[in-house]
């Protein structure tokens, strides 16, 4: 049952407004924040509505679904892989995705680079960092970053442009703030001339405003835009998704 009836364009306008106000609170230029519409739970019709509303960045977390949806729409959007990538899908992933957010090991980074070379693609890669240290989360540990960045320097096709993280599920968006702040600090600390980690992918439906305040350049918002009636991860302890 739809419990909210506003059309997509109105929900999108509301989220864009919230991004602008969060940026203003932090003294940031809102145009430095890209909204990635996570379409994984949306029907196919979302793409036409999104394009008409000016959305040019879409995110999927499954290679196979993205392949189907990318067909015929390759040039309409920048395609983001927002979830974990299994290394045996690296070749398929680089054919579809322009930006890979969840690269979490040196081996996977090198696999992606080889695949990109094979198809003459130049994907952007964000290294996922497990800043919270939760055992259940994917991601490099902060101490692993220097080695991963050293490996990044030796790649021929994949370009590491920044970092990504997921905050632990919590009751309150404020709980995500220290994790987002820690990711931004890592980005600054490990940026080098010619190898800036300028992109910070952080923030989802429940915490994107906090992420923008802490320096996010990419926010990944799905549910709030495509299934506003669905329970969020903060309810996930009682509802299986
Ligand atoms: C699904 C997903 C999102 C979007 O989350 P919502 O809560 O639906 O906004 C963002 N990032 C990743 C990695 C995801 O898997």
Image: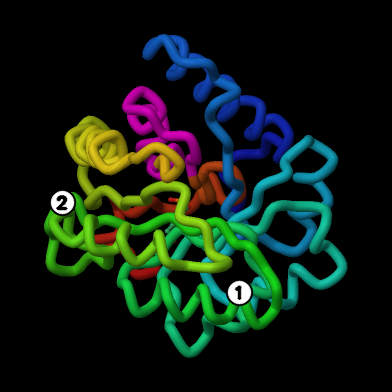
**Which disc number belongs to residue 153?**
none
Q: Secondary structure at mark 1?
A: helix
**Residues drawn in magenta:** 197-219
The x, y position of residue 102, in whole percent, is 41, 63
Q: Is residue 209 magenta?
A: yes
The x, y position of residue 216, in whole percent, is 41, 34
Q: Is residue 35 above or below residue 86?
A: above
Q: Is residue 84 magenta?
A: no
Crowd band around label 2 with a 10 angstrom C-alpha radius: few (<14), some (14–19), many (20+): many
**Residue designated by label 2:** 132
Number of callouts: 2
Q: Is residue 91 above or below residue 100?
A: below
Tell me whether the residue at label 2 lies in contact with that at label 1, contact meaning CB atoms closer than 8 angstroms: no
Tag 1 or tag 2, which sits nearer the N-term? 1
The x, y position of residue 144, in whole percent, is 18, 62
Q: Residue at x 36, y 37 (%)?
A: 207
Q: Residue at x 63, y 33 (%)?
A: 11
> Which of these two is toward me, 188 or 38?
188
**Residue designated by label 1:** 116
- Specify whether residue 140 is in view: yes
> In the rendered view of the protein, which quadrant contains the C terminus?
bottom left
Query: Cβ of disc 2 within 8 Å of ligand 1?
Result: no
Q: Residue at x 37, y 49 (%)?
A: 163
- Quadrant of the image occupied by residue 190: top left
Q: Secondary structure at mark 2?
A: loop
Image quarter where ligand 1 lies: bottom left
Crowd band around label 1 with a 10 angstrom C-alpha radius: few (<14), some (14–19), many (20+): many
Observer-side mark, 2 or 1, equals: 1
Residue 150 appears left or right of 221: left
């Amino acid at each position: 049952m739809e419990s909210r009836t506003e059309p997509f364009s109105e929900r999108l306008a509301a989220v864009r407004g919230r991004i602008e106000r969060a940026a203003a609170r932090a003294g940031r230029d809102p145009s430095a924040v890209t909204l990635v519409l996570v379409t994984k739970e949306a029907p196919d019709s979302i793409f036409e509505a999104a394009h008409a509303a000016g959305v040019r960045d879409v995110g999927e977390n499954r290679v196979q679904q993205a392949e189907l949806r990318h067909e015929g729409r390759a040039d309409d959007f920048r395609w983001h892989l927002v979830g974990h990538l299994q290394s045996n899908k690296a070749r398929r992933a680089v054919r579809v995705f322009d930006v890979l957010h969840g690269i979490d090991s040196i081996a996977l980074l090198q696999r992606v680079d080889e695949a990109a070379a094979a198809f003459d693609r130049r994907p952007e890669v964000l290294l996922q960092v497990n800043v919270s240290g939760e055992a259940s989360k994917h991601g490099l540990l902060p101490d692993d970053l220097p080695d991963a960045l050293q490996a990044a320097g030796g790649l021929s096709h994949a370009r590491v442009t920044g970092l990504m993280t997921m905050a632990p599920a919590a009751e309150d968006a404020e709980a995500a703030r220290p994790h987002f702040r820690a990711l931004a600090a890592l980005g600054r600390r490990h940026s080098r001339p010619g190898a800036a980690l300028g992109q910070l992918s952080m923030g989802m439906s429940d915490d994107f405003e906090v992420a923008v305040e802490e320096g996010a350049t990419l926010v990944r918002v799905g549910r709030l835009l495509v299934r506003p009636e669905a329970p969020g991860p903060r309810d996930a302890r009682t509802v299986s998704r």
